[in-house]
Image: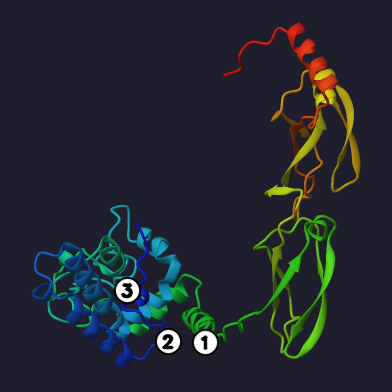
Amino acid sequence: MEYRDYYKTLGVGRTASQADIKKAYRKLARQHHPDRNAGDKAAERRFKDVNEAHAVLGDPDKRKQYDALGANWQAFSRAGGPGGGSPFGAGGPFSGGNVRYEFRTTGGEDVGGFSDFFRAVFGAARSAAAGGAGAAGGRASPRGGPSAQGFDDILSGMGIDPDSILDARRNRAARPQPRPAVEADAELDLEEAFRGTTRLVEVDGKRLEVTIPPGVDTGTRIKFTGKGGDGRDLVVIVRVRPHRTFTRRGADLERDLSVTLEEALLGADVAVPTLKGRLVLTLPPGTQAGRTFRLSGQGMPRFKASGSGDLYVRIRVVLPTNLSAEAADAARRFLELVDQPDPR
């Protein structure tokens, strides 16, 4: 069963006053009222949710119980007995004796249209306990559930300090929110992103040197705790400039490599410049233009992780131009000796 956040339903904070809760309820009730949204099932569900939230938060006693239960509501619900009844209902561990509890909304309707969560916490079981409404202990508070004092006693009997629960919740709600971080941009070359570098960024009129780790990419956000001035964090947003030779795909790199007709046709060992240095790539005889070779581990370092990506080298065959008459004749004689099928 899903926990229902009634504060979120009404769009108010947990420290909201009763007046704020009432104001939010009236606004939402008018907005989603069935008379204004005929046939709109979504609005009808929203209207019911708003009424249920107000039935709890608009009642100081129920609100105190709801706040105290918090995320522990399932444990309290299970304590209601093997039948899964309400912990506040008749016969439950929080019932207070032979008491009949009737739970109603502020408008006098019963809980039949409310959620399973509401019934589990505030009591769908409205039948009279032994002795009925006239038995010892009398009727429950007209607001529903045990009195606030009785509820505190129940929590205390379970080893839970009601004041500590409520104080902790209020403290969390009142805790000041962290101030937004200061942002600064840093533009890098691919080589700088590969090996890491430093940058001077301006924060509140002051220049601060920050260290950019290897492997960053465009859009990488680097957080420097407390470096933004006045106790705020500094977030540096990286942009890596395009490179004339390498194309980046995450941690992998791609590049073209130009080779001669002889190297592609007969095979050769050719040098390949990488960001780590020069490597030798062995081309097998008959290497076709467009063939791609993978050089493992020759890509970018992985940001905040071990290892590196790969480098993919795509072959580009450069044909000789401005052939002399003698060279053209030799090329024809050569091609007459080659049995090459039509590639198209």
Count of marks overlaid on the render:
3
Q: Please tell me which residue is depicted at 80% across the width and 58% down the height of the picture.
A: 214
Task: Classify residue 312 by image quadrant.
Answer: top right
Mark 3 — residue? 9
Q: Amino acid at mark 2?
A: Thr
Q: Please tell me which residue is depicted at 26% across the width and 79% down the height of the picture.
A: 54
Mark 1 — residue? 174
Rate crowding at label 3 as few (under 14), some (14 to 19) or many (20 or more) other CA atoms within 10 Å.
Answer: some
Q: Secondary structure at mark 1?
A: helix
Residue 138 appearing in the image: no
Q: Does residue 287 lie above or below 119 as drawn? A: above
Mark 1–mark 2 distance (CA, rounded to whole Å): 8 Å
Rate crowding at label 1 as few (under 14), some (14 to 19) or many (20 or more) other CA atoms within 10 Å.
Answer: few
Relative to 314, 260 lies left or right = right
Q: Which mark is residue 15?
A: 2
Q: Does residue 94 lie above or below 204 as drawn? A: above
Q: Secondary structure at mark 3?
A: helix
Q: Are marks 1 and 2 in contact (CB under 8 Å)?
A: yes
Q: Position of residue 191 (x, y in %)?
A: 82, 57
Q: Please tell me which residue is depicted at 70% across the width and 48% down the height of the picture.
A: 247
* Frontmost residue, 242 versus 42: 242
Mark 2–mark 3 distance (CA, rounded to whole Å): 15 Å
Q: Amino acid at mark 3?
A: Thr
**Nearer mark to the viewer, of 1 and 3:** 3
Q: Does residue 119 lie above or below 317 as drawn? A: below
Q: Position of residue 19 (x, y in %)?
A: 30, 93
Relative to 66, 247 lies left or right = right
Which is nearer the N-term, disc 2 or disc 3? 3
The quarter in which the N terminus is drawn is bottom left
